[in-house]
Image: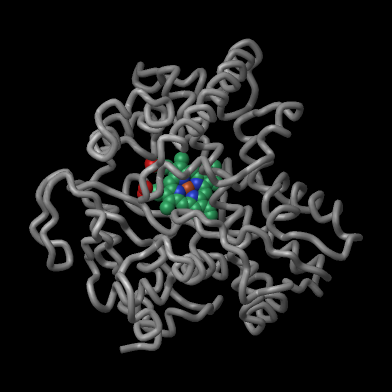
Amino acid sequence: MNEHVQTAASGPLFNHLSADFIHDPYPHYARLRATDPVHLTPFGTYVVSRHAEVSLVLRDKRFGKDFVERSKRRYGSQIMDESLFHNMAQTILQTDPPQHTRLRNLVVKAFTARRVEDMRPRIQQVVDQALDAIVDRGRMDLVADFAYRLPVTIICDMLGIPQEHREVFHTSSGDSVRILESVPLTPEETKQGNARVQMAQMYFQQLFDLRRRNPGDDLTTQLVQAEEDGNKLTNEELTANIMLLFIAGHETTINLIGNSLLALHRNPDQLSLLKANPSLIANAIDEFLRFEPSVQFTGRVALEDIDDLGGKKIPKGESVLCLLGSANRDPAVYPDRPDCLDITRKNIKPLSFGGGIHFCLGAQLARIEVEIAINTLLRRLPGLRIDDVENPEWRPNLVLRGPKRLPASW
Ligand code: HEM
């Protein structure tokens, strides 16, 4: 038994609500992988923790999102009358083929490698401006003052949100993704979520009208005009997917910047190595993604009876939670010190952007944003120190993992 299995040796196998789990889920993952890698929890979900099974579930057509039926089973059939759920059901993230294929084909064009590469100068400019604004202060919160602005600004650019409307988008709480958590929403949370969706719908309707009258070189204009095999997006699909892109395009990346900076400062040898060799950054980002992924779980439903998943039968209709953060540290795939950060590690294949048909559309964009953010920060503020690397306050969110704040000085 390894050290981590011993550390988390008591209590329920999967208690992701405990403070201990939020502080450091990895010993808990190690215990799951070693003792019950396809674990049926008391709340009726199968939790899958090894790389092999996580990878299989993400790619196998016998598993899907089944969002509408899953939500009805969980909350009752009236749940789809709630705007929050109705809206989420129209997103690329929560649909299955053929709707998923049609939606994804429309949006994917905005994320070609070429288009994303062309965004480098703008990303560099936004990072430099963020640092210019605080460089004389000697102190900042790396999350609020640095990590936050970049992805929000870039996704607003991509969506063509006019400058004068952006302030309202510059508040983030992570609440928008509560619906993706494994813990059911309370009626109050559903009500708050409905209100957020309705406000966003009102705003985006105005933006669509503006872009119809006044087209721009942006994704909203493209989608407003979109036609794929004669299949236009419905108005509801349009709003739902623009909202999804906005949320997916920033919450995740903010956390990855925070997690990467924290991981580097907890491992001073790796920090010095990267400072001395900035060209290691591409490999380092794969390692940051592997080591502390900002999306920890994603869910699927068995669309038919599954005879054997890691030795267990999964009946049709049952939910499966894929632990991406656990798969990324599976010693079967990373035999060499999986719990250590090593920016020179070879053959890193993190599952942090998912896999199969729902593989993250923004993966390349996120990599470039994090690459420029980290290398520029280390170059411009070489004396940067994080106040408390051991006990940062983590966001209370379970799907998205990242520090809430990271006070630092230089
Ligand atoms: C570090 C940053 C990011 C991480 C870790 C991340 C992670 C993920 C993961 C794990 C999935 C798959 C979910 C599933 O299988 O259920 C996903 C899907 C998605 N991501 Fe990202 N993401 C990041 C950044 C972005 C950005 C910058 C954008 C857009 C600008 C984006 C847009 C999307 C979209 C639209 C999907 C749904 C794709 C589909 O269902 O076909 N993501 N992301």
Residue 152, compared with residue 145, is above or below; it is above
Q: Which residue occupies 56% across, 29% down?
A: 219
Q: Relative to the observer, which residue lies in front, 385 or 62?
A: 385
Residue 403, compared with residue 105, is above or below; it is below
Q: Horizontal placement of 221 versus 353: left or right?
A: right
- On the question of residue 363 being in view, the answer is no
Q: Which residue occupies 36% across, 52% down?
A: 298
As drawn, the residue found furthest toward the right would be 136
Q: What percent of the width, then of the height, locates residue 185?
A: 40, 41
Residue 307, compared with residue 388, is above or below; it is above
Q: Which residue occupies 29% across, 61% down?
A: 54
How did the renderer colour the structure? one colour
- Give the position of the C terminus as an image quadrant: bottom right
Question: How many numbered tags mark residues here?
Answer: 0
Q: Relative to the observer, which residue lies in front, 216 or 146?
A: 146
Query: In the figure, residue 170 lies in which quadrant?
Result: top right
Q: What percent of the width, then of the height, locates residue 353?
A: 43, 55
Q: Which residue occupies 33% across, 81% down?
A: 9
Q: Relative to the observer, which residue lies in front, 111 or 304?
A: 304
Residue 378, compared with residue 338, is above or below; it is above
- Give the position of the N terminus as an image quadrant: bottom left
Q: Horizontal placement of 248 versus 165: left or right?
A: left
